Every structure is written in C-alpha cells, then in structure tokens.
Image: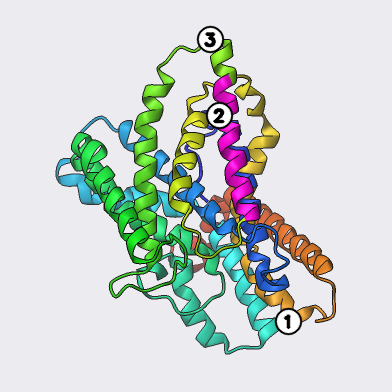
Amino acid sequence: MEKLSSKRGRVGEMELWRFLFAIIIVFHHSRNLIGNENAPFFNGAYAVEFFFILSGYLLMQSIAHSQDLPGDRLGTETIQFIKNKYLSFCPDLYISWIIGFLATVIITRCNVLELFMGGFWEMTLLHMGGLYISKINSAVWYLSSMLLGMLILYPLLRRYKETAKKLLVPLITLFLLGWFYQETGSLRVPFDWNGITFKANLRAIADLGLGVICYQTTQWFSSLSFNKPAKVMVALVKYFCYGTLITYMFTVDEVPPTQDFFFLILWMIAIGMTFSRQSIANHIFDNKWIFFLGKFSLPLYLSHYYWSNLLGELLPKSMAWGWKLAAYWAVSLSTAAIVMLLSSLWKKHRKTILLSLKKVFLKKED
C-alpha cells in the first residue's frame, strides 16, 4: 500500500483508515478459502479504490511541492520518482514474496524453476505490463498498476502542471470512467485483457486522476476557517461517507456492482476531508499506535493472499468455515509480523551486511 510521505507529515486518521481497509481486503480474499457465501466483505475489492485515490492524492502533493520545472531532466526525474516509490515497498515485497514462493513449493510440490521464472515478474512489479504468468501473490497487481499509472501521469503533471491538473488529467479520468461504465459496467476484474493492456491499469490511471482532483479541492477546503459547529458537521459528513462505503462493501454481493461509479464521489469526499484536518478532534489519531497500524498495513497486504489459496490444501475439507477463517487470519498476521520484523532488521543492519558482502565478493583496492 502507498506509504505517506514522512512521519512528520503523516495524518494519523489516514493511517488508521489504511489499516482498516487493508483488513477489509484480507477479509475479501478469504473467499478463496471459505467460499463466496461465507466470506465477510464479499464486495471488499472496492477498498482498492481508496488506495488508488490516496496514491493519486500523494502523487499530486509531491508534484505540488516541486517548484522548479524539470526541463530536460523530466525522464530522469520520473524514473527516480518511480524508483523511490518501488523501493518504499522493499524489502517487505521481497520477503513476503519469498515466503509465498517457498510455501507454494512445499505445499503444492510444483515445478520450482517454472514457478520462479513466472513469479519473477511479480517481484519486479512489472507483471501488469502484460508479463503475468504465475499467481504466487496476485494481490500485488495493485502496486504494479499504480506504478505504471504514475509513469504516465507524473511526467504529464510535471511538464504541464497547471494545464494537466486542471484540464488534462480530469478529462482523462472522465473518459476512462465513461469507458468502464459503457464497456463493462464495472471497475472490477483487474486481469481482463482488452487487447492492449490489463483492465487494472486503466482503472489505476482513472483512480489516480481522482486523487489528483481530490488534492486540488482539498487545498481549497483546507483554506477555509470553520467554527466548532462546522467542524462537527465536517466530522459527521466524513464518517457518514466512510460508514456508507464500509456498509456497501459488507452488504453488496452483486458482481459487478454498477454503484461503484457513484460511490467514487464518497471516497473523494472522505479522503479530502481527512487530509484537510478540518473536522473536530482529528488530532486524537496522531499517536504511535495508530502510526504502527498504518505501517503494518503494507506487510499485511503483501502477506495474506497466498494463504487464502494454500490453506485449502492443508486444512481438512470438513473443517467449519469459521475455523478456517480463524486459521487464515492467524497465519496471515503471523506472516505479516515476520515480514515487518525482517524488514526492520534489514533496514537497521543493511550497511553492515552490504559492507560484509563487498569484502567477500570484491577485490581490495590497492
């Protein structure tokens, strides 16, 4: 999931929502293990829209803070931006993928070389460009599509900042959402191939565009001076939007649901109001526990999907679905904790490890 820029600039409430919507996605994928009829949040795939729009908001925020024009450095700057985004998922991405790879090999006894060669593209996050073969950790399609979408929008917004953010990106977003509605009636089914690219990539560009629009409206909204009753009203509207979206994801079982397009507006209102910090008592979320949950959302997202498939091979077919769900959560949370721990250890001792490897494999300079 998209990381907020820095601890000083993080919004505690947004960190909490990141964690809660990651949980909804984990519940949604439990259907692979316990069946559609038993899975909580059968419509939980819609939570991905939250993360896409949030990523678009942060993309525009980053660009807005870049004052100078890139000139001939636009290509280099774009690659550096995407590189930094990719590295923000590491080493969690690698650790979780290796665990999933080993678990898949051990449990399914599949061809190791074939699985690795196919799954390699998942690790690089290039697989949504079309090189999608294996399904070790299909949930990372979101990260891949997000990066590909940013590769298109970032240089456009940097080169033509005012024109792009006020005209070009909103038009692209409108046309893509219109295409989705008329062609398929849904934003879902990310791995559908339209002859040129995966449907998920167009979905990413459209949702990132909504985030760009959300950032601009939030800047205006944040500049207003509200009194206490108005701040209470902002909080009520914000939580009404979040509550309605969560209820929608929990209760709706129609696939594909055409209501997705209307509820995109609620996502934008909720995210914008959260970032504006105009609601009453929003500071209560700015504490280390909430920030920890926000940080934990990434390893949790990266470490659950393969278990929704693999546990079916291990657990008795006769086991009650409730116990299967409990086992799924236990192993997913445990794996996420291991990923977070190993990632933390790597970041802490990275320089020492790399220096040791350098001494082993490189010749000493004369």
Q: Name the kind of residue labelled 1 in the image.
A: Glu
Above or below, comparing residue 226 to residue 279 in the picture: above
Q: Give the residue pinned by disc 2.
A: 237
Say what secondary structure mark 2 lies in: helix
Residue 252, compared with residue 124, is above or below; it is above
Identify which residue is drawn at 19% across, 45% down. Answer: 73
Where residue 251 appears, x then y in whole percent? 65, 54
In this image, 341 relative to 176: left or right? right
Residue at the far top: name it: 227
Q: Is residue 194 left or right of residue 288?
A: left
Q: From the viewer's side, name the closer residue of 222 and 263.
A: 263
Q: Is residue 59 visible from the viewing direction of this image?
A: no
Residue 59 position in % (x across, y down): 37, 42
The residue located at (56%, 63%) in the rendering is 254
Magenta residues, start to end: 233-251
Tell me the mark number nearer the camera, choosing from 3 and 2: 2
Compare residues 78 and 356 and report the one nearer the observer: 78
Mark 2 surroundings: few (<14), some (14-19) or many (≥20) residues within 10 A: some
Residue at the disc numbered 1: 313
Which residue matches tag 3? Answer: 227
The label nearer to you, 1 versus 2, is: 2
